[in-house]
Image (tube, rainbow, N blue to C red):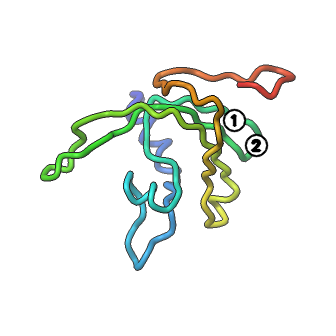
């Protein structure tokens, strides 16, 4: 079995979590997600499980602006934000994302890795 077929087999069981519909309109997507307090879509971010139901997400790259005719991404930006994803809240139909305050705020990064240090509250 090739890796692409295996990926698609695994993906069938995934559930996409989106903010609740507003007036029957899906709230999935970059602009809609930001409007309802969800973490902006991104790639190249670091993630670390901190409990059985919570994940910390830092940085990553996202589309900064879209072409007004084609809708394609025409410029990228690097995020410098830290978010907590609480899966339990998402399954209850609530906003699963909380933006965490970082002080001082560090330069945004993309393509990095995070690890939990044993016996520590640091990533």
Residue 61: image location, x then y, percent: 41, 32
Q: Which quadrant of the rendered structure holds the N terminus?
A: top left
The answer to whether the residue labelled 1 contacts the one labelled 2, judged by CB atoms less than 8 Å apart, is: yes
Q: Residues within 10 Å of mark 1 (few under 14, many from 20)?
A: some
Q: Circle 1 sits on which residue?
A: 49
Q: CA distance from mark 1 to mark 2?
A: 7 Å
From the viewer's perspective, tell me whether residue 25 is left or right of residue 20: left
* Residue at the limit of the structure toward the left, as seen here: 69
Q: Who's the residue at 63% across and 47% down the image? A: 85
The answer to which quarter of the image holds residue 8 is: top left
Q: Residues within 10 Å of mark 2 (few under 14, many from 20)?
A: few
Q: Circle 2 sits on which residue?
A: 52
Which element type, helix, strand or loop, lies under badge 1? strand
Residue 32: image location, x then y, percent: 40, 60
- Vertical placement of residue 40 versus 2, above or below: below
- Vertical placement of residue 10 versus 89, above or below: above
Q: Who's the residue at 41% across and 28% down the image? A: 3
* Residue at the limit of the structure toward the front, as seen here: 104
Residue 52: image location, x then y, percent: 76, 43
91, 40: nearer the viewer: 40
90, 98: nearer the viewer: 98
The answer to which quarter of the image holds residue 119 is: top right
Q: Who's the residue at 67% across and 50% down the image? A: 86
* Residue at the limit of the structure toward the bottom, as seen here: 23
Residue 92: image location, x then y, percent: 67, 65
- Vertical placement of residue 8 versus 80, above or below: below
Which element type, helix, strand or loop, lies under badge 2? loop
């Amino acid at each position: 079995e090739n890796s692409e077929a295996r990926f698609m087999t695994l993906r069938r069981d995934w559930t996409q979590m989106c903010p609740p519909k507003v007036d029957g309109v899906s709230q999935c997507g970059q602009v809609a997600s930001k409007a309802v307090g969800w973490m902006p879509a991104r790639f190249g971010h670091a993630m670390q499980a901190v409990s059985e139901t919570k994940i910390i997400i830092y940085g990553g790259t996202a589309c900064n602006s879209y072409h007004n005719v084609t809708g394609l991404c025409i410029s990228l930006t690097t995020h410098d934000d830290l978010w907590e994803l609480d899966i339990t809240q998402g399954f209850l139909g609530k906003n699963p994302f909380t933006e965490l305050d970082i002080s001082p705020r560090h330069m945004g990064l993309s393509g990095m890795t995070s690890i939990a240090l044993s016996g520590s509250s640091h990533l």
